[in-house]
Image (cartoon, rainbow, N blue to C red):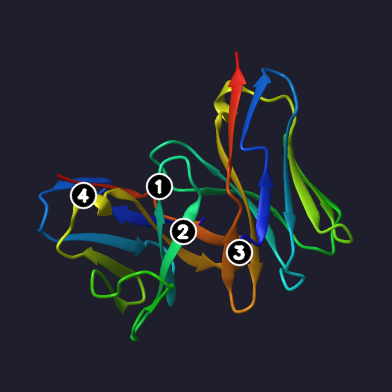
Amino acid sequence: QQQVKQSPQSLIVQKGGISIINCAYENTAFDYFPWYQQFPGKGPALLIAIRPDVSEKKEGRFTISFNKSAKQFSLHIMDSQPGDSATYFCAAFSDPRQLTFGSGTQLTVLP
Amino acid sequence: GAVVSQHPSRVICKSGTSVKIECRSLDFQATTMFWYRQFPKQSLMLMATSNEGSKATYEQGVEKDKFLINHASLTLSTLTVTSAHPEDSSFYICSASTFGQGGYTFGSGTRLTVV
């Protein structure tokens, strides 16, 4: 059973636009929500993360919005750049420390 | 920041042979490491959890006799794919827990091709 649902599967955005990726979870025991960025042929790299007691976290052009009551969280990439083209995974941690990944979103930013 | 080194990055082997993949935590001790498998355009699938000094814990459906995991030190875990077959061709990724620095740190992955 997929515990973290991610959408869309793929996303095409013009340079300078806003990329939005959404995730929803079911397990209320999740207590930490990271986003990973993965380039082809490479391992995932931590992009930004949030805890459920915070509604928003911003780091540069990347923002996580978190809605605890709706059990949803999203990644916003402002001023999207061609270099942001990658696959993005949302994820969630629960105790014992296990990481559950979303299905991934392939982002393409057109120049 | 924490760095996890994975080697080799690519390997091609003949069907029936064994291949060893190494995962090292370079600047921290990792009592627990994780091994994932990723098919093209798919998410990461957890294969097993590697604990230093003890037997690995395998996820349901993962053949422990085929995917041998050894975690003999606090900085090294190895995954050996035994008697590899073409269907074992995949992208294998390791990770280590670095909660003090934001979660899990992943290695750069190993592309295994069995011919």
- Give the chain letter at badge 4: B
Estimate the spatial distance between the alpha carbons at disc 3 and disc 1, rounded to whole Å: 18 Å
Q: Residues within 10 Å of mark 1 (few under 14, many from 20)?
A: few
**Amino acid identity at mark 2:** Met
Disc 4 versus disc 3: distance between alpha carbons? Answer: 28 Å
Name the residue beneath numbered marker 3: A1
Disc 1 to disc 4: CB gap under 8 Å:
no
Q: Which numbered circle lies on residue B86?
A: 4
Residue B62, by quadrant, is bottom left
Question: Which residue is at a point 42% across and 63% down the rendered structure image?
Answer: B27
Residue B19 higher or lower than B78, as above or below: above
Q: Label 2: chain?
A: B
Badge 1 marks a residue whose secondary structure is loop
Q: What subunit carries mark 1?
A: B
Q: Are marks 1 and 4 on the same chain?
A: yes
Q: Secondary structure at mark 4?
A: helix
**Residue corresponding to mark 2:** B45
Question: Do the numbered discs 1 and 2 sit on residues whose CB atoms are within 8 Å?
Answer: yes
Do discs 4 and 3 belong to a common subunit? no
Establish if B15 lies above or below B101: above
Q: CA distance from mark 2 to mark 3?
A: 13 Å
Which residue in the structure is indicated by mark 1? B39
Task: Name which residue type carries label 4.
Answer: Pro
